[in-house]
Amino acid sequence: MFGSQKIQELLDVSAITTLLDTFIIGSTSYPMIARGHLVPDAWGPQASTINYYTTSSIAGGIEYGAFSYTVNCRAATELRSQEIAQAIYTALNRDVQGSYGVVCSIMPSIPPMDETDNFNTIIEVTLRTDGTIA
């Protein structure tokens, strides 16, 4: 809904996922990408992960769709967190994916609150479309 499938597709590319840890279901390995405000507790603070969620409202009075997402790039070190954010920026910013144009902004890193937390570099990703959502 509202570009959520598209943002998942855009984040699930090797230039980004090779920087992430993985989890296993059965015999299949998946990159640690979570939709929602939090990552699963089982992933732990040492894992390199991404979680994302919608931050835009739906504006009915405009001729195009604009869907904004906050993407949290989490890692045990600030450098790794920034590397993940930079990979997302490099892969997505000013790119066109189907009917979507993508614009990104990287925010300053947030340090861990305590030993149960990790570094978080936030990147804002906006998907713009002419209204024909693919």
Image (tube, rainbow, N blue to C red):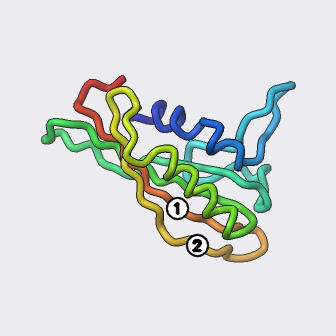
Q: From the image, which quarter does the N terminus lie in? A: top left
Query: Does residue 12 appear left or right of residue 107 in this picture?
Result: right
Left or right placement of residue 47 versus residue 7 in this view: right
Return the residue at label 2.
110
User: Residue drawn 32% across and 26% down?
Assistant: 133
- Residues marked 1 and 2 touching at CB (< 8 Å): yes
Identify the residue shown where x is 48% and y is 31%.
Answer: 5
Q: How many marks?
A: 2
Cα–Cα gap, marks 1 and 2: 8 Å
Q: Residue 122: which disc?
A: 1
| Quarter location, residue 86 | bottom right
Q: Residue at x 53, y 48 (%)?
A: 52
Q: Say which of 6 and 36 sits in front.
A: 6
Q: Say what amino acid the circle numbered 2 marks.
A: Ile
- Judged left or right of residue 115, residue 112 is left
Q: Residues within 10 Å of mark 2 (few under 14, many from 20)?
A: some
Q: In terms of secondary structure, where does tag 2 sit?
A: strand
